[in-house]
Image: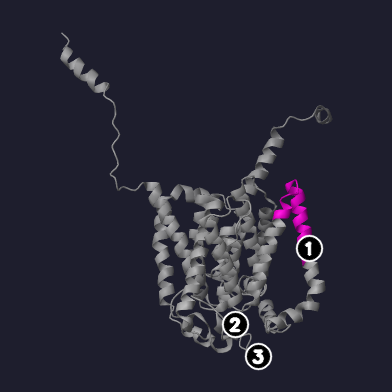
């Protein structure tokens, strides 16, 4: 005989609705924690790359005696937090690594070969580790949030940094203004006025208001416009002619990209950009020497770029000594090692004053040529792209302008790329990763293969 009471119990149990367990009011979701950690890593790596700190000595000769303990502590503290984020997002990061373009992989292999064959393997490994620790958070941030949010993050950091440096200089001019041979040059929280000038030039382009966004007169736009003006003032106060030229290059790049965006067709825009770059290079080559002396004299310098030409001639012998794998990663960022090849130069250079030459000296000529090819192709691809969304379009133009600023500045300044300095993470954030271009090419190939052949072509192959 069937027990109806048991059936009722079972029926009531099966028909009971599932009530979801409520989250405690102060709980944080897994994704929110992971994203918050990535934001912290990105801002902290930018802070470490700039090297901003309190109480740097005012003269250039005392820079070598600066205690690097706080900066090393900041660098090492990035490692456990980065490993934690990697552990929380293993699958996404694994997919990101598998989609790295082959050109980047080849360049990384050349870096590894140069490090293993370095004249001082310990110094090269230490330099490579510093660059990796600075680079990974920025690359992960852009992979997670995309270009628009990455640009917004950079703009916020530049906004805070511009105000912080000027307030620090106004409150403590003894430390914010350099003395000695560079007396009167503002450097703020940075170690050197050149670093402050380079960062200010990039910040000027990042903070420049967008004419496509409306309404114009909002508190946010006014604050960013004021910070943009102060960034340009900071570049001038640093008394760095390179910084002022880079700010002008960035502004001209934005204007050029805005005009190029009206050209229909990406292929035509690519040709227009390439022709514009060639014409600009030719203009500089043929007419630059005639006005270079006047421009350099206006900044208190000579036609030899303050002795840079003499320095580069001396370093060419060192380049030819190890042309294939170089002297080792980061070796020519060390003043003591540079002095071995420049002891005959009276003014005692502490760097190569040319990032491309520095990369060739460290990694070899093939690696430097490959890196230039990666830069040029990424820049042209970024500049020729015109997204439909206004936010994406302005972000794309700013990224291309930042890339051009750093690429041009690398001709006369060292350490702007592949170094744990401010411009390197900014370049990484601005560079396209190359996956979109590869995906689009693959999609076009698949469409062509899937497209049925024409009757005439079928008859020819029959």
Residue stretch in magenta: 258-280
Q: Quadrant of residue 82?
A: bottom left
Colour convention: one colour
Q: Are marks 1 and 3 in contact (CB under 8 Å)?
A: no
Are the residues tagged 2 and 1 within 8 Å (C-beta)?
no
- The relative height of residue 330 versus residue 343 in the rendered view (above or below) is above
- Residue 143 in the image: state x and y as whole percent: 52, 52
Q: Which residue is mark 1?
A: 278
Q: Can you say whether 309 is above or below 421 in the image? A: below
**Callout 3 environment at 10 Å: few (<14), some (14 to 19), or many (20+)?**
few
Foreground residue among 369 and 276: 276
Q: CA distance from mark 1 to mark 3?
A: 37 Å
Secondary structure predominantly adopted by residues drawn in magenta: helix
**Figure check: 368 above or below 303:** above
Q: Which residue is mark 2?
A: 338
Q: Position of residue 367 (x, y in %)?
A: 64, 66
- Which residue in the protein does label 3 denote? 344
- Check disc 1 and report its element: helix, strand or loop: helix
Label 3 and label 2: CA atoms lie apart by 11 Å
Badge 1 or badge 3: first in the primary sequence:
1
């Amino acid at each position: 005989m069937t027990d109806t009471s048991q059936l009722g119990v079972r029926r009531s149990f099966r028909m009971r609705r599932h009530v979801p367990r409520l989250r405690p009011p102060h709980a944080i979701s897994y994704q929110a924690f992971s994203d918050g950690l990535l934001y912290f890593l990105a801002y902290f790596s930018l802070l470490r790359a700039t090297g901003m700190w309190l109480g740097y000595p005012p003269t250039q000769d005392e820079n070598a005696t600066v205690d690097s303990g706080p900066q090393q502590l900041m660098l090492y503290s990035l490692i456990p937090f980065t490993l934690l984020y990697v552990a929380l997002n293993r699958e996404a990061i694994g997919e990101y690594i598998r989609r790295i373009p082959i050109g980047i992989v080849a360049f990384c292999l050349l870096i590894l070969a140069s490090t293993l064959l370095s004249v001082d393997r310990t110094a090269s490994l230490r330099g490579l580790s510093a660059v990796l620790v600075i680079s990974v958070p920025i690359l992960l941030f852009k992979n997670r949030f995309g270009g628009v949010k990455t640009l917004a993050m950079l703009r916020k950091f530049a906004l805070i940094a511009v105000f912080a440096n000027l307030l620090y200089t106004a409150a403590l001019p003894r430390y914010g203004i350099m003395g000695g041979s560079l007396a009167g040059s503002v450097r703020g929280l940075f170690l050197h006025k050149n670093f402050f000038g380079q960062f200010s030039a990039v910040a000027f382009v990042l903070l420049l208001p967008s004419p496509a966004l409306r309404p114009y007169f909002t508190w946010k736009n006014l604050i960013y416009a004021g910070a943009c003006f102060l960034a340009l003032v900071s570049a001038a106060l640093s008394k760095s002619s390179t910084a002022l030229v880079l700010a002008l290059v960035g502004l001209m790049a934005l204007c050029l990209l805005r005009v190029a965006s009206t050209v229909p067709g990406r292929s035509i825009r690519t040709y227009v950009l390439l022709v514009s770059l060639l014409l600009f290079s030719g203009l500089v080559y043929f007419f630059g020497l005639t006005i270079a002396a006047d421009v350099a004299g206006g900044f208190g310098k000579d036609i030899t770029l303050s002795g840079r030409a003499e320095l580069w001639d001396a370093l060419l012998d060192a380049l030819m000594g190890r042309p294939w794998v170089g002297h080792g990663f980061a070796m020519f960022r060390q003043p003591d090692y540079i002095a071995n090849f420049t002891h005959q130069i009276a003014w005692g250079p502490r760097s190569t004053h040319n990032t491309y030459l520095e990369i060739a000296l460290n990694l070899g000529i093939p690696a430097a040529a490959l890196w230039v090819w990666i830069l040029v192709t990424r820049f042209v691809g970024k500049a020729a792209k015109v997204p439909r969304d206004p936010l994406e379009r302005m972000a794309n133009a700013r990224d291309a302008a930042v890339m051009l600023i750093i690429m041009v500045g690398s001709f006369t300044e060292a350490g702007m790329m592949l170094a744990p300095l401010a411009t390197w993470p900014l370049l990484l954030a601005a560079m396209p990763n190359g996956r979109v271009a590869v995906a689009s090419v693959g999609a076009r190939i698949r469409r062509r293969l899937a497209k049925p052949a024409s009757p005439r072509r079928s008859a020819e192959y029959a």
